[in-house]
Amino acid sequence: MQEEQSTYRSDSRHVPSAELRAPSLTVVIPVFNEAITITSILRKVASSPVVSEIIVVDDGSTDGSRNILEALMPSLAFRLCLHKANAGKAAALRTGFSLASGAYTIIQDADLEYDPTDYTRLIRCLQRHKADAVFGSRFLGKGNPTSLHGIGNRILTFLSNLLSGQHLTDMETCYKVIRSDWLKRFRMSAERFSFEPEVTLLLARRRARIIEVPIIYNGRSHSEGKKIGLRDAFHAVATMIRLALSR
């Protein structure tokens, strides 16, 4: 599928505070049919004092998200990339990663499950431990996932740890702060949500220093727009096995 139809730029820039100016942080936001929440999450991200760049990738939305994003550009500082058709979350992320100029990149879902106020904690941990990546763990923080979704996340994390030699509590978390130069060099082919195990195992191959930090999490149900499902769990397992066999 064609990944990028056009790119727009805003002229303004969001300048981080002097206290946490280094390293610079790019936020990549993949969007697919999030018209209800996209305005709120963009405003929250733009208000973070540690963000130096915001890249939004609309992955073929059909619910008006694209029109909302274009309307927000004069008032918020972000770069907008448009996919002609829905190619999956992983494809949207690869588009964003290729354009990132910050030293580090963090992923932000376009819903309201994850709270951008956690960015400061993640960046401080990154600086303190001189880590290659920082993962925000929902199982260490407030509002951790329960029910079948939470159980599934724990099972996938266990399998990831088994194959990678890591000791993570939440491999499937959206909040991953990773060196941008590594993200640009990784040869990633995952689709949809199997990006999470793929990038985690690729980091393990590079012997990356990964630190986990507790984060705030407010999960939503499928009736509220959650898109990940059982099919994605099978794809995640298949991705991990593929990477394990290709070592």
Image (cartoon, grey):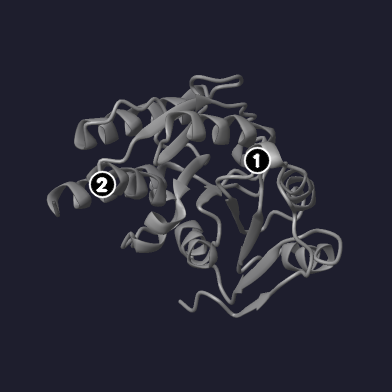
- Residue 53 is situated, as x and y percent measured from the top left of the image, at 65, 57
Vertical relation: 79 (above or below) 128: below
State whether residue 71 appears in this view.
Answer: yes
Amino acid residing under circle 1: Ser
Image position, residue 99 (x, y; %): 53, 67
- Separation of disc 2 and disc 1 at Cα? 39 Å
Q: Residues within 10 Å of mark 1 (few under 14, many from 20)?
A: few
Please tell me which residue lies in front, 76 or 49: 49
Res 203 → quadrant? top left
Q: Number of numbered discs present?
A: 2
Q: Could you tell me the amino acid type at mark 2?
A: Arg
Residue at 51 percent across and 29 percent down: it is 125
Question: Where is mark 1, residue-wise?
Answer: 223
Residue at left offset 60%, top offset 19%: 142
Q: Which residue is mark 2?
A: 206
Pointer 2 or 1: first along the chain: 2
Visible residue check, residue 220: no
Relative side of 169 to 67, left or right? left
Residue 140 placed where, x, y %? 50, 19
